């Protein structure tokens, strides 16, 4: 109990800076701040929406429900949302530690694995980012599933003596390990298996990355559960899980395809090369966790393609992965934890390694939240085995681990955890503000159009338009195919009295992102309301505004004011009046006083048979 309390306290201390963080411009708006269903809190209608929606290219209804519950509890106070993420992370760390302690009988090694999971800097993104609730929530159900499966599989009442000592005393031909003694049969195995399935489903409903969980259970059947059954029986009992994984994969792929978040035009060789490189990069960052960023541009989606690894480096990375796999298999009998940990890492990363490219990132720290458990497990048990061979044996110890090895292992663990805690606290500090987070990302990963764009957006929100403009221009230079910086540049140029340049940028937005209604809407507003007659065009404005409403679908009401202004500029005042009245009524119903007042100002013009002119120009 004392170790668990200490682990929770240290984790809270390391992540405390994140509790003072704001919502992040990247995704937090779509997930919480600007999401009308989430902002409305938990209702039956919103719960039904959570199971129907595929926005952001994700289907994770339990995650949506958790965000709604946060709003019920904390409103839009970002600190409350961060606190829930952190509490889930603390619970996950404790569940992992206690599960390993129960499954292996190794107290200190289990504690070190739990502490590495709790304090490693690669996990900051999953904890400090409100939008990554899906990581901590799905892992919570995943670890509960492991507990239920442990009860279903049964726990040995007397593990191998070598597994109970800290660190393990390596067995030798002269001193073989005692035979394993199994506990009596598990009571109510069907109930525990059913609970395992239920928790697996809840995990999938939180994040579909858990589709690899049945393979993890097969690894755990080997070690530490040591289930002495044939492979056919072990596979057969997991058929329901494989079916659930397949169903979740199909649903996820369809949702992501419909949301246009998958980049299937990337050649298979390119995706495979990035996957191989990412496996090695994640390992490198695990053992040297510095230069971490919220966004790493994909080498073949970034422009210019300056992030690509040369072919010979990809070959070396593939050779390294193969060599480590062969080594793990060669040591599988004497060191099963090495193979279990390594293949846990390789397998659980498969859904997010980029073989099916989703998003613009080449890799992401948040993807390591579950996979690194395997690396920690293999490393800690491996160090314990090596430490048991150091120093002279003491006959008086009665076969206890060698003292020098224990001291070395303890020192290494303490240094690693101290370094992780310090780096995690520093990394969590970057997440306190949008500006600090993206400036750090730009410093870590230069030629980063997304970071430049969000820095510009934050500066623009602060009224620093000239500085914002410079960053938007840098974003366009870094990636000329990125539409949003053109949009923001258009807004600034229009406000600075340069409508011709603004139009050029809005036209570029439409060209690059033809399905985005905001690009059409903004250009239509300029064409309908600009004071200069040469910038206006009623027919073009109507066409653009109608297209924006068509693309917006059930959210077209946001663009009714522009549509009304376009009708008025074209001389169609009856349609303009009706559209503005609808916009006014919808704004009042939604409690949006600002939009309602703007609609009233427009209505006053249309009822007098005159177009509306934007007073901000």
Image: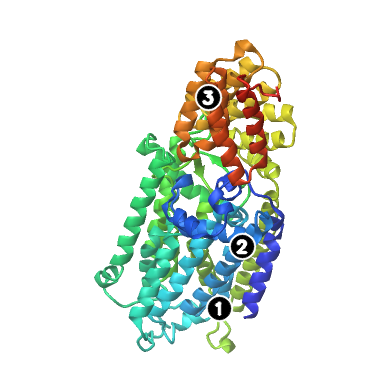
Residue 279 image offset from top left, x and y in percent: 47, 49
Residue 231 in view: yes
C-alpha span from label 1 to label 2: 28 Å
Q: According to the image, label 3 marks what residue?
A: 574
Residue 189 image offset from top left, x and y in percent: 34, 81
Residue 426 image offset from top left, x and y in percent: 70, 53
State the quadrant of the N terminus: bottom right
C-alpha span from label 2 to label 3: 51 Å
Comes first in the chain, label 2 or label 3: 2
Establish if 601 lies above or below 428: above
C-alpha span from label 3 to label 1: 77 Å
State the quadrant of the C terminus: top right
Residue 300 in view: no
Residue at point 64% right, 26% down?
491
Q: According to the image, label 2 marks what residue?
A: 84
Residue 228, located in which quarter of the rendered image? bottom left
Element class at badge 3: helix
């Amino acid at each position: 109990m004392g170790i668990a309390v200490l682990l929770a306290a240290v984790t809270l201390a390391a992540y405390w800076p994140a509790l003072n963080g704001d919502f992040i411009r990247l995704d937090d708006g779509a997930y919480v701040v600007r999401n009308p269903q989430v902002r409305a809190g938990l209702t039956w209608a919103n719960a039904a929406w959570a199971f129907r929606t595929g926005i952001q290219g994700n289907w994770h209804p339990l995650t949506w429900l958790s965000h709604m519950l946060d709003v019920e509890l904390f409103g839009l106070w970002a600190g409350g949302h961060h606190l829930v993420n952190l509490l889930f992370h603390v619970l996950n760390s404790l569940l992992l530690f206690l599960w390993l302690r129960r499954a292996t009988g190794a107290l200190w090694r289990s504690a070190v694995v739990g502490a590495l999971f709790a304090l490693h800097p690669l996990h900051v993104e999953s904890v400090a980012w409100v939008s990554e609730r899906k990581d901590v929530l799905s892992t919570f159900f995943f670890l509960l599933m492991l507990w239920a499966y442990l009860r279903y599989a049964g726990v040995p009442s007397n593990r191998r003596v070598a597994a109970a000592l800290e660190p393990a005393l390596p067995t030798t031909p002269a001193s073989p390990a005692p035979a394993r003694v199994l506990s009596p049969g598990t009571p109510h195995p069907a109930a525990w298996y059913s609970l395992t399935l239920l928790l697996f489903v809840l995990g999938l409903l939180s994040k579909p990355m858990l589709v690899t969980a049945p393979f993890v259970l097969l690894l755990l059947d080997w070690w530490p559960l040591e289930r002495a059954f044939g492979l056919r029986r072990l596979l057969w009992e997991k058929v329901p899980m494989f079916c659930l994984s397949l169903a979740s994969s199909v649903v996820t792929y369809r949702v992501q395809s419909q949301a246009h978040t998958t980049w299937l035009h990337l050649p298979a060789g390119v995706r495979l090369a990035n996957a191989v490189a990412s496996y090695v990069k994640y390992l490198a960052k695990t053992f040297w966790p510095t230069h971490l960023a919220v966004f790493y541009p994909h080498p073949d989606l970034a422009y210019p393609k300056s992030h690509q690894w040369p072919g010979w480096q990809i070959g070396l990375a593939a050779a390294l992965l193969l060599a480590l796999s062969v080594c793990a298999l060669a040591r599988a009998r004497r060191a099963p934890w090495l193979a279990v940990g390594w293949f846990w890492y390789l397998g659980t990363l498969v859904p997010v390694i980029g073989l099916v490219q989703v998003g613009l990132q080449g890799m992401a720290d948040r993807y390591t939240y579950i996979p690194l458990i395997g690396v920690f497990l293999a490393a800690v048990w491996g160090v314990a085995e090596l430490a048991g061979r150091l120093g002279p044996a003491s006959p008086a110890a009665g076969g206890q681990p060698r003292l020098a090895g224990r001291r070395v292992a303890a020192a290494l663990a303490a240094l690693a955890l101290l370094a992780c805690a310090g780096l995690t606290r520093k990394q969590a500090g970057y997440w306190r503000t949008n500006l600090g987070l993206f400036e750090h990302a730009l410093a870590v990963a230069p030629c980063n159009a997304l970071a430049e764009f969000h820095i510009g957006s934050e500066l623009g929100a602060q009224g620093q338009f000239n500085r914002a403009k410079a960053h938007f221009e840098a974003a366009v230079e870094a990636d000329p195919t990125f539409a949003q910086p053109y949009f923001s540049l258009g807004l600034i140029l229009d406000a600075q009295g340069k409508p011709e340049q603004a139009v050029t940028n809005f036209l570029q937005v439409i060209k690059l992102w033809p399905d985005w209604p905001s690009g059409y809407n903004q250009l239509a507003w300029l064409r309908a309301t600009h004071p200069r007659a040469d910038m206006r065009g009623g027919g073009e404005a109507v066409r653009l505004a109608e297209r924006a409403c068509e693309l917006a679908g059930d959210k077209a009401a946001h663009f009714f004011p522009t549509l009304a202004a376009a009708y008025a500029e074209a001389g169609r005042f009856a349609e303009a009046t009706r559209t503005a009245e609808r916009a006014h009524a919808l704004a009042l119903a939604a409690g949006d006083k600002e939009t309602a007042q703007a609609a009233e100002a427009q209505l006053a013009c249309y009822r007098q048979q005159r177009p509306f002119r934007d007073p901000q120009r």
